[in-house]
Amino acid sequence: MHRLYYDSGEEFMGNERMAKRCEFYPGEVLYGLVRLHEVTGDDKWLDAVINNKFHLDGHYGVPEKNHWMLYTLKHLYNYEKTERIYTHAKRIAESTIEASPRNREIGNACGIATFTEGLICFLDIASRSSYAFGPSLKQRLIECIQENLVFQLKYRRPEGSFLLSEKQKIMRIDAVQHNVSGYMYYADCVAKGYI
């Protein structure tokens, strides 16, 4: 668990309390449940995700640019190739594309790495979809992914780790994980002919 938060919105993490919620957590949990279904074959995990009306309403994850929700939707699309899933993912991707230049400008390296991961998830969904992708959206999507990947290289250290951001020049495991995953998934999209 990344963080625990109370109904009041107050958050508890270790010995400190914060008045902030982690809006990424529900997407991460839903992704974990889809992956649990894939590993165990037990439909109760997949059903729990599909029946989650609150987070699959088409709006959750859009303002947050939630990469975990895009992971969830990418894997859920294997089981439910619906316009609802495609449109939800597209909304998050468009929000992410729009926010990427500003996040690159302020040096949010780890944030950009999560954007890259999420956008690649949408590229996967859209490339397998029968819904209209449109050359303009595909071009903007691929350009944004590639610009993000080039930006991310500025924060790569000689031993292969990645710094967190322009302001926080520290190496943290989440920065490494999100950066490495983005490059791996990009290579996979190239191999599949999506790019």
Image (spheres, grey):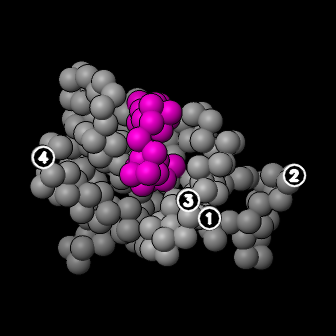
Q: Position of residue 113 (x, y in %)?
A: 36, 54
- The part of the chain drawn in magenta is 69-94
- Identify the element where label 4 is drawn: loop
Quadrant of the frame with the N terminus: bottom right
The residue shown at (77%, 60%) is 5
Considering only order in the chain, which callout, 1 or 2, is on the residue closer to the N terminus? Answer: 2
Count neighbours of disc 4 (C-alpha within 10 A) and say few if under 14, some if 14 to 19, many if 20 or more. few
The residue to which callout 1 is attached is 44
Q: CA distance from mark 3 to mark 1?
A: 6 Å
In-image side of 16 versus 71 (left or right) = right
Give the number of the disc on residue 193: 4
Side of 84 relative to 119 (left or right): right
Between circles 2 and 1, the one closer to the viewer is 1
Q: Which residue is mark 3?
A: 46
Per the rendering, the mark at residue 8 is 2
Q: Is residue 47 visible?
A: yes
Numbered disc 3: secondary structure: helix
Disc 3 marks which amino acid?
A: Leu
In the depicted view, which residue is nearer to us: 171 or 55?
55
The amino acid type of the residue labelled 2 equals Ser
